[in-house]
Image: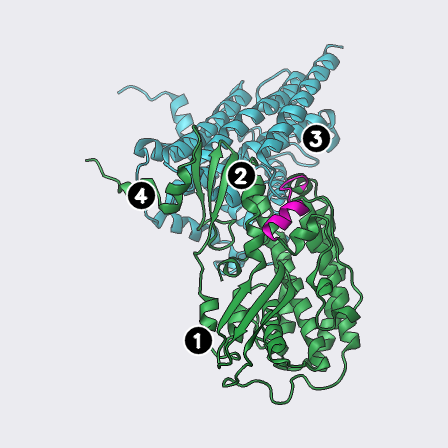
Chain colours: A cyan, B green
Amino acid sequence: MNAIPIELIHIVIAIALVAGFVGLNGLVLVWVERKVAGHVQRRPGPYEVGPNGLLQPLADAAKLVGKQLFTPDGSDKLVFWLAPIVSFLPVMPMFLPMPFSPFLTAMEVNVGLVLILAFAGLNILALCLAGWGSNNKYGLLGAGRAVAQGVAYEIPLLLSVLAVCFMTGSLSLTEIVAAQGNWPWQWNWIYQPIAFILYFTCGVAETNRAPFDLPEAESELVAGFHTEYSGMGFGLFFLAEYAEMIVVCGVATALFLGGWKGPGAAGAWWFLLKLYVLLVIMIWFRWTYPRTRFDQLLNLCWKWLLPLSILNLLVTALVIKL
Amino acid sequence: MTRTINPDYIRGDLYTQRFEQGKRENTLILNMGPQHPSTHGVLRVVLEMDGEYIVRAEPVLGYLHRMHEKMAEVKSYVGFMPNMGRVDYLHPLAWNWSYAGAVERLAGIEVPRRAEFLRVIATELNRISSHLLWWGAYLLDLGAFTPIMYAFEDREILMDILQRPTGARLTYSYFRLGGVGADMDERCLRQILDFVPYLRKKLPVYKDLVTDNVILRKRLEGVGDMDVDMCRRYGATGPILRGAGLASDTRLNETYSVYNEIDFDIPSFPETDAMARYMVRIREIEESLKIVEQAVAMIPEGEILIKGAPKPNWKAPAGEAYFATEGARGKVGVWVVSDGGKSPYRIKLRAPGFSNLSLFAEASQGTLLADAVAIMGSIDMVIPEIDR
């Protein structure tokens, strides 16, 4: 019997752990979102299922799993059911290079950042497939918006990330964190404030969260690209969106907020704390702001974010060279 | 195995087929509604879309038609009053008033002075609650989920107040032919006086958080021009006309009841866009608070219903009469024709929402889909009132 390569075992275990982490975090994040939304809206939020509604996400998940999977007439079956899977699967590898702590990184990759950004790009394909396959005009419009928005915002996102990579001279998230100090003023957000703001704005747009939630703008497109999805088809899109929020905020934590480092004992708790602070800010956006219009969204990207990020990159390069 | 799809399903119904006849090349016919989150009930709009842009739009009505006008012809004069609470469920008291006023004008009934003040107070409070709900729902259309919760919180207090004299929370039938149904006691008037400063304190918070928000302003400014000329052509009234810069208000133009004794302004904004209509409604909440405050201070003692008020078997004198009031959405007119019988010969309800909606098709041409939603919301439609 041939020995199974140790690397393969490593990856399988890592992916299993990541799947658990994504699932658990999805549940926690749903609860956090609904609680924050509740308190922003002067109501208690979920309260009945479990203590303080803690088991509400589980009940919701059970409901979603139990629902009938419905394929609309005239839809492209293969594309229709491929879309939620294409949306969710790339999430797993995105967590592999995430540096929770020096000892808690699923897979040490020296181009971790590239890996994450590459898989993040796949999400747009999923939304496109979903809108195209469901034979629904609202879905189609939503998919069109998703593609235009996703492609546009990916560029300033990449450029703002590049500025940080220039400073550290590495594409490995672990090394970027290691290059930052223990105290908040030694983190990259002090050296790269513009890149941080740009990255976070683009991240909100990339994950299709309000005020940039145009692909699923419910008051215009009913539910946009996932209008026709029910049960776990919708559930997977939902889970993928939350997982991507975690990825975006996790990368922001590693790049700009010093990752696992912090005053006192460094460790994964610092990473999780910063991650959740960013996530709550993201949730707060959603429950405060109205939605932008499509042309305004693209104008913001092409006329402001893109030139700003290029300028930021050039200045960074110049300063490093000096 | 191939499944056959019913060809009717693809072809669409009569409205879609007719609308499709003028279709351009490379456009998409989109049915918005009757089941759509931002058409507020069961309005249906057929759109011809060129990408995200709207080439043509056509509202399709009638999904909530309940034959109120026909119903009047078989009901007694008194028995028709509850229908008026159900035409426009957000501002039912304006309809109450228009109907009661028309019949009173027809029969020459004088309403006691205290009843006039009670009518003013109740109607203005109802106007505030209508505008608050519009505000919340409009922000929901624009993608902000939170304001509606705040609007409902304030509206809840108003409904509690109005529940005491009217006995209902939504479909009020408070007015009677020749007065009102019940008096407002000391406690009720005190609650109203407490509510006025409460809402005055809340409005600046809403201004800071919502009205001055840059995203909201960008969404509303310069969107959906409806100028005075357009309003005249379609007969638009209310906040739409005032948002076009014409300070026209039935309460002062064709003054009725005791409005001419009360000091209040007619807010109007000349910008003609959705933001102007938004601002008109926000300012109207303040003006209504002013009216309520004065009316409570001026209210005299006395009867609330005339002696010998019409009973169900009451016969109106033959003739016809028209009476209009200012509802939250515009001029609410009721025209009553009597042949001297127990029930009206004919009743015509002039719903402001119907005229206001007819501006939508023209105003939405060439706009983005998101703008169309913003324009539709700024019209402040109540579908049961449009369909009647």
- The residue tagged 3 is A182
Q: Chain of mark 4?
A: B
Q: Could one spot residue A308 in this view of the protein?
A: yes
Residue at 39%, 50% in the rendered image: A62
From this view, report whether residue B171 is shown above or below residue A119. below
Query: Callout 1, which amino acid?
Result: Val
| Count of marks placed on residues | 4
Q: CA distance from mark 3 to mark 4?
A: 64 Å
Q: CA distance from mark 3 to mark 1?
A: 83 Å
Q: Which residues are magenta?
A: B221-235
Query: Residue A142 location, x and y as percent?
Result: 47, 35
Q: Nearer the viewer, mark 3 or mark 1?
A: 1
Q: Nearer the viewer, mark 2 or mark 1?
A: 1
Query: Residue A25 location, x and y as percent?
Result: 50, 42
Verify CB contact (< 8 Å) between mark 3 and mark 1: no
Query: Residue A2 location, x and y as percent?
Result: 29, 19
Residue at 49%, 31% in the rendered image: B51
From this view, report whether residue B23 is shown above or below residue B107. above
Q: CA distance from mark 2 to mark 3?
A: 49 Å
Q: Of the residues under marks 4 and 1, which one precedes in the sequence?
A: 4
Query: Callout 4, which amino acid?
Result: Tyr
Q: Secondary structure at mark 3?
A: loop
Q: CA distance from mark 4 to mark 2?
A: 24 Å
In the rendered structure, find residue B369 and report the number of the disc placed on it: 2
In the rendered image, which quarter contains the C terminus of chain A?
top right
In the rendered structure, find residue B74 and report the number of the disc placed on it: 1
Whether labels 2 and 3 share one chain: no
Q: Chain of mark 1?
A: B
Q: Secondary structure at mark 4?
A: helix
